[in-house]
Amino acid sequence: MSLKLVIMVSGRGSNMKAILEAIEQKELDAQVSLVFSNNAQAPALETAAKYGVQTASISSRGLSRSEHESLVVDLLKKHQFDYIVLAGYMRILSKSFLDHYRDKNGFYRVINIHPSLLPSFPGATGYDDAFNAGVAESGVTVHLVDEEVDHGPILAQWSFMRQAGDSLESFKARGLAIEHILYPRVLQSVARGGIALKDNKIGLVFAVENKEISAR
Ligand code: GRF
């Protein structure tokens, strides 16, 4: 089926752009109903508009989490979507927000991409933390969101090796290039087959070979 998505962003929006590009290239069978940001200045909003996608923002400044989230829920009621796709959305979503978006199996219809091999290095600085810890291998995780931060059923992971002479920048660039390939592919896998349940658990819907790709 063609997936209907709301993408939530806070900043640069390179993952959002990769998703919009994959849709344009017909590699991803999806439509984006709305790109939403908590930050009206997010460069992602301008990029989304260039792709002809509707955008909206509601600042969280001066609002409690629940006040902000209830405005977002009201806004999202005006749009049809199967999944909320988090692409660098820098706010934690509460259980009461997530409860609006449960699927028939009880999972939240909210997908996130995180720049580490979860459960290692959750939090806002996944690449920095993995790099500074001196790992030999790191990676990227796409997962369903649950009540805990950077947690929830893993849909796909793709690892990459730290290379001799890597700087934090080259390490991040290698990871980000993988993100841009992985996220649209996972979404396409969801568009094709939904999110499969096995023994009442979600398994990897998508496995990628551990092969090196070069940063673009
Ligand atoms: C990405 O590294 C993503 O994994 C993380 O936040 C960053 C967002 O980058 N959740 P961008 O806005 O998609 O360029």
Image: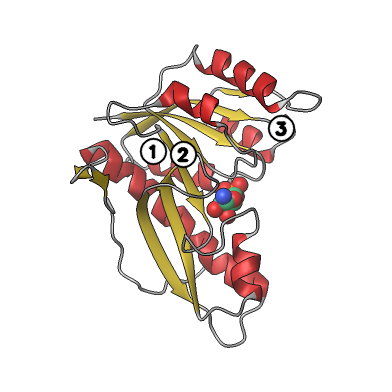
Provide residue 176's location: percent of width, then percent of height.
Answer: 54, 60
Which is nearer the eye, 125 or 214?
125
Measured along the vertical axis of the image, is residue 117 above or below residue 105? below
Provide residue 141's location: percent of width, then percent of height.
Answer: 44, 56
The colouring scheme, among rainbow, by chain, secondary structure or one colour, is secondary structure
- Can I make out residue 216 in this image? no
Q: Secondary structure at mark 2?
A: helix
Count how many numbered circles sit on residues in the image.
Answer: 3
Measured along the vertical axis of the image, is residue 5 above or below residue 153? above
Name the residue type under label 1: Ile
Name the residue type under label 2: Leu
In the displayed structure image, the side of residue 206 where residue 62 appears, left or right: right
Name the residue type under label 3: Asn
Say if disc 1 is inside 8 Å of ligand 1.
no
In front: label 2 or label 3: 3
Provide residue 186's location: percent of width, then percent of height.
Answer: 34, 48
To which residue does mark 3 refer? 39
Q: Residue at x 57, y 15 (%)?
A: 75
Nearer the N terminus, badge 2 or badge 3? 2
Tell me the number on the disc at residue 20. Answer: 2
Q: Quadrant of residue 21?
A: top left
